[in-house]
């Protein structure tokens, strides 16, 4: 089985589905001849031609707007937004149009579009190339939001997303793009949208993460194990619709919860997860749930490693939560 | 004409400063002292210097992420710029912005923008301020040809044209929006046609001769200052390096680059100076002074204190009530 990094795994998923289905179209800035700023779409232009792999002007609103129109008539566009920080000129199209089409046409029209976009920090991009805006889209009814942490999941989830009839925001953690290689089948396979995965079983505390921070959570779980704390790690994979049952089941076992995300704390997705767990498992909680997140500041250029909720911040949170005595 | 020659010598000094600053920035980047993205202005120097020379104190300037050149041309010190690149507290944005997000209030520089087209309507608002207050200041708004396709560009120009604002839009057309040439992303090749739709003056010329840039931008700036409305200027230019340090620029040929380098604005200005009677010694003196200034800037930036977490938290909002996690961060 070939070893792939996340860039190659996403490329493999796109190639697979473009071969399967002529309705799949890729469009975005530099995605064609150049192969994308992170080279995720490399080679697709040569294989599928310029009417299926489209270099667009710099015009995010136009890219997403036209992709919505394509999708309404049965095509399956996969637009790329070069950085998720650049998505805001298209925010209106996503929130006002893509998210509401099925609803306002009484279910007659769907928007089977997947917006792929690199997310998160770790490359010192500063405030316009590092943000994690996922909660803005989760807050908008009508959108699915996916964020794989690793190459294998990325391929399987992207194939599911392209085949899904709803609009999907597909966030690719750019810090992971070339950081991890693993076995990824050349053939097609899918991972269901809406299913989290327990990636490490534990007894004492549950830690929930996604994207690049999942690896930090795993590293912290290893670290606290040396101190006799057994952490259960859940990779959310799909952020919305959220697999709350997997989290609640885990919290019922451990009684303790730590949520990790790069986005700022205020109204970050951790706030919603924490509310849901409190609603569904209040009596099982044995310690105050904790969020380890980015600060409520713009994403910094210089102080990136202080801003990100990395292992050095997750580990003490796990220890304190696991050892908390009411 | 001695005064003309002296002015041109100063233009040369400013262009040479940008060139050497950028080369040292590239070196510092390669040494790992600068992180993230670094977009160099090498090849485009005549535009920043010629345009800055057309301004007066009080005018305001907006630029894209390729913002080192105009900052230096407006008078920001190389030290402040280099320190910002290295994420130091002495940087022009106290290490919070980095390469793409310079600021220099003292010299009227309103910032470099990492979001394409995000600044165009903001610049129109700054020009509205001048019209409203009658301060007779002019706003310059720079962007690349790639930005002329984005919604923010059109909305900004639409309002500036409608309200006859004292603003000059300068499109530095360096032929490539990152890696994609303009002919693959624009239905028209003369971008001043877009200005027509917004009822403003248009001008279009090559940006390799700093004197030409100065004269033509000055015409537009004067027009704006007199209340005769905005101008859209398309200036043909070329970047000698990739889009950023991580771009090997494989989308263009070596031959094309070599051809373009024949129009190096520094070489053109140097030739003009020698024809005007400047001596090799005059030019050498300038180059030596600039070399020393850039070397000192690198040294000062190396030695400066790193950016501070307190600045990060304190600068989010005017009131210090803002971030809930300051105490958490202090732990």
Image: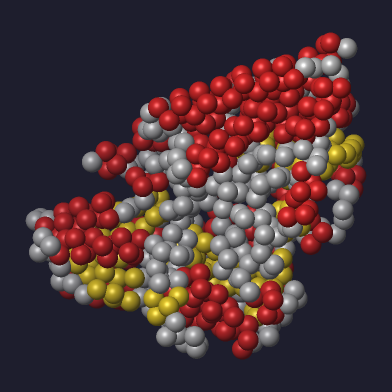
Residue drawn at point x = 16 percent, y = 61 percent = A224
| B23 vs B301, nearest the viewer | B23
Q: Position of residue A92 (x, y in %)?
A: 63, 58
Say above or below: B40 vs A75: above
Residue drawn at point x = 74 percent, y = 23 percent = B11
Q: Is residue B144 visible?
A: yes
Q: Is residue A110 visible?
A: no
Q: Position of residue B172 (x, y in %)?
A: 76, 42
Picture mark count: 0
Residue drawn at point x = 33 percent, y = 76 percent = A197
Say above or below: B184 vs B138: below
| B301 vs A256, nearest the viewer | B301
**Left or right: B95 as drawn, with respect to A309:** right
- Res. A306 image quadrant: top left
Residue drawn at point x = 66 percent, y = 56 percent = B249
> Which image quarter holds the C terminus of chain B?
top left
């Amino acid at each position: 089985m070939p070893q792939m990094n996340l860039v190659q795994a996403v490329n493999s998923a796109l190639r697979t589905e473009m071969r399967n289905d002529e309705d799949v179209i890729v469009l975005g800035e530099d995605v064609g001849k150049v192969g994308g700023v992170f080279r995720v779409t490399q080679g697709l232009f040569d294989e599928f031609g310029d009417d299926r792999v489209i270099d667009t002007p710099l015009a995010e609103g136009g890219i997403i707007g036209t992709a919505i129109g394509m999708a309404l008539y049965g095509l399956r566009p996969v637009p790329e937004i070069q950085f998720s920080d650049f998505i805001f000129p298209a925010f209106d199209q996503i929130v006002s149009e893509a998210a509401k089409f099925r609803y306002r046409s009484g279910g007659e029209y769907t928007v089977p579009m997947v917006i792929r976009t690199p997310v998160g920090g770790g490359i010192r991009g500063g405030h316009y190339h590092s943000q994690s805006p996922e909660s803005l889209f989760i807050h908008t009814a009508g959108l699915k939001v996916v964020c794989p942490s690793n190459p294998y999941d990325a391929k399987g989830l992207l194939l599911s997303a392209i085949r899904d009839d709803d609009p999907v925001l597909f966030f690719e953690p750019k810090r992971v793009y070339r950081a991890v290689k693993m076995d990824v089948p050349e053939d097609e396979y899918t991972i269901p949208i809406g299913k989290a995965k327990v990636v490490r079983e534990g007894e004492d505390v549950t830690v929930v993460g996604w994207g690049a921070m999942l690896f930090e959570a795993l590293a912290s779980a290893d670290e606290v194990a040396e101190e006799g704390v057994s952490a259960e790690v859940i990779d959310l994979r799909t952020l919305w619709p959220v697999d709350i049952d997997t989290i609640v089941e885990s919290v019922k076992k451990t009684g303790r919860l730590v949520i990790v995300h790069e986005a700022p704390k205020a109204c970050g997705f951790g706030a919603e997860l924490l509310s849901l767990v409190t609603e569904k498992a209040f009596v099982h909680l044995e310690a105050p749930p904790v969020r380890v997140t980015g600060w409520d500041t713009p994403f910094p250029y210089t102080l990136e490693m202080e801003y990100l909720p990395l292992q050095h911040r997750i580990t003490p949170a796990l220890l304190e939560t696991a050892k908390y005595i009411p | 004409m001695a005064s003309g020659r002296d002015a041109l010598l100063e233009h040369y000094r400013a262009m040479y400063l940008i060139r050497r600053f950028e080369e040292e920035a590239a070196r510092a980047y390669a040494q790992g002292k600068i992180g993230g993205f670094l977009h160099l202005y090498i090849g485009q120097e005549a535009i920043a210097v010629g345009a800055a020379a057309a301004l007066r104190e009080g005018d305001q300037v907006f630029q894209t992420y390729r913002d080192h050149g105009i900052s230096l041309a407006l008078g920001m010190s190389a030290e402040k710029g280099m320190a910002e690149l290295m994420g130091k507290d002495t940087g022009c944005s106290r290490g919070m912005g980095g390469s793409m997000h310079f600021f220099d209030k003292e010299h009227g520089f309103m910032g470099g923008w990492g979001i394409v087209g995000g600044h165009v309507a903001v610049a129109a608002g700054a020009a509205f301020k001048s019209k409203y207050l009658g301060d007779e200041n002019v706003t310059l708004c720079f962007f690349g040809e790639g930005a002329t396709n984005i919604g923010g560009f059109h909305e900004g120009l639409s309002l500036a044209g409608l309200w006859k604002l004292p603003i000059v839009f300068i499109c530095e057309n360096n032929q490539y929006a990152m890696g994609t040439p303009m002919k693959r992303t624009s239905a028209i090749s003369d971008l001043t046609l877009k200005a027509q739709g917004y009822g403003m003056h248009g001008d279009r010329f090559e940006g390799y001769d700093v004197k030409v840039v100065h004269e033509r931008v000055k015409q537009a700036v004067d027009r704006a200052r007199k209340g005769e409305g905005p101008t859209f200027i398309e200036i043909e230019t070329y970047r000698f390096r990739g889009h950023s340090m991580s771009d090997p620029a494989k989308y263009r040929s070596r031959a094309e680059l070599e051809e373009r380098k024949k129009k190096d604005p520094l070489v053109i200005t140097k030739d003009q100076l020698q024809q005007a009677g400047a001596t090799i010694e005059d030019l050498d003196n300038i180059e030596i002074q600039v070399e020393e200034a850039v070397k000192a800037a690198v040294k000062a930036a190396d030695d400066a204190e790193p950016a501070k977490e307190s600045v990060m938290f304190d600068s989010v909002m005017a009131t210090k009530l803002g971030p809930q996690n300051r105490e958490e961060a202090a732990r």
